[in-house]
Amino acid sequence: MGYTVKQTKTEFERGVLTVTLIFYIFEHGNRNEMKSALEDVKIADFTQMMQGPWATQKLAEMGADVIKIERIGGEWERTLEAGGELYEGTSPFFLAMNRNKRSITLDLKSEEGQEVALDIIRESDVLVENFRPGVMEKFGLGYDDVCEANPEIIYVSGSGFGSSGPYVDRPGQDLLLQAMTGLANQTGRRDDPPTPAGSAVVDEHSAMLIAFSILVALYHKQRTGEGQRAEVNLMNSAIDFQCQEITAALSTDMEVNRSEAGISSPFNSGPYGIYETADGHVAIAMAPVDVLADTLGLEELQQYDGTEFEDRDEIKRVLEAYTRECETESLLTRLLDADVWASKVNDFHEMAEDPQVQHNDMVRTFEHPEVGEYTTTGIPVTLSETPGEITSQPPMPGEHTDEVLGELDYSDEQIRKLHENDVVSRTD
């Protein structure tokens, strides 16, 4: 009898445990199925070019539902040539920054289009735009208008110079901001003209600050229920990007001059720079001159031990006269074996074949319904519990128009009329 009671109790406990587990899984999901960190976040994306779209793509890769709201016919960067070319009729720049998004096209100059946009915003957690200041207000979609429709919205604006000030009406663009904030003036040899970076670094940093601002605002909203407005501009981003150089130049009495021989930063000592070899180039970073002298058998470098900044140009000339006679791989092996910070200078194709790049899965090839196979970059961050994921390729203009409208409870008849009135469009 005692055994029977014990058995019954055990079965009862098992039953309770089973029911509890079922409810837990129902409430929280199966822990073995990784969730996307931002899967409950919806973003109304009114952005174009790089500053906005790269920011929203980063969030889309972490699970956010990004609805790309484009003009009829699609964002104009879809046809922006890269090096004078398109890839199968589409800009490679657009393909690089718009995956994992859904597209709806709207005529925002029409009252019907503005109302559809407001319907999307009512269901969204975040709105992101990077028109010139004042454009969203002309569409009836300024911050005050949007807050009436969704008081808890996080409204993020990207611009060239901010929403006020003497430059508010100026066009903001990456090259212009590299020039205005001193970056171009710090790049290149002393006798070269100011030299811009080979990538849109100001746009890129600005995009990261937009993504950062959104995450901060979402965290605040999670704790308080409050939305807010955030602004990011290219000028501030370019200055922030150069924080260490600007601090050094403005806080000390140093004279900031570019190197005559090609030291890669006005603030660094020899041998910091790019060196020609017999079959290419190598980069040598902050390496002690005496170590280089011993490693390469260059006794003449010893005289500069302790005067690396004052004699940086001579160090560069002496060292480069030697490296020009060396094969790249042989030189690199000797330097790395001596723990000298050095690397080969790659072009993009060589970079894609680099074993560490391949290990990190940072160059990916995909199939796109319009352009076919194309190669682009991967996801740059790794998260153990909520990893990013590439779930879809950049959308066709308005590809998801009917889908998004259906989610907003528009009837088939209402959707048909919007198409008839050219308020929306769809590309299958």
Image: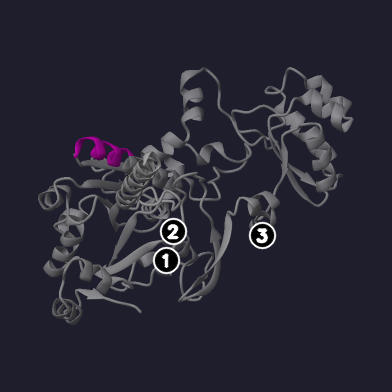
Q: Is residue 91 above or below residue 34?
A: below
C-alpha separation, residue under disc 3 versus residue under disc 1: 23 Å
Q: Secondary structure at mark 2?
A: helix
In this view of the protein, which residue sits in the foreground, 131 or 362? 362
Q: Position of residue 396 (x, y in %)?
A: 38, 72
| Residue 45 located left or right of residue 363 | left
Magenta region, residue range: 216-225
Q: Position of residue 127 (x, y in %)?
A: 25, 52
Q: Mark 1 highlights which residue? A: 394
Q: Mark 3 highlights which residue? A: 349
Q: Is residue 20 above or below residue 111?
A: above
Label 1–label 2 contact, CB within 8 A: yes
Label 3–label 1 contact, CB within 8 A: no
* Residue displayed at 13% across by 57% down: 140
Kindly identify the amino acid type of the residue bearing the numbered disc 3. Answer: His
Classed neighbour count for the residue bearing mark 2: other residues with Cα under 10 Å, few (<14), some (14–19), many (≥20): many
The mark that comes first in sequence, 1 or 2, is 2
In this view of the protein, which residue sits in the foreground, 197 or 30? 30
Kindly identify the amino acid type of the residue bearing the numbered disc 2. Answer: Met
C-alpha separation, residue under disc 1 versus residue under disc 2: 8 Å
Residue sticking out furthest to the left: 148
Q: Position of residue 363 (x, y in %)?
A: 59, 58
C-alpha separation, residue under disc 2 versus residue under disc 3: 20 Å
Magenta stretch encompasses residue 223: yes
In this view of the protein, which residue sits in the foreground, 178 or 374? 374
In this view of the protein, which residue sits in the foreground, 405 or 427? 405
| Residue 186 located left or right of residue 416 | right
Q: Position of residue 323 (x, y in %)?
A: 82, 41
Kindly identify the amino acid type of the residue bearing the numbered disc 1. Answer: Pro
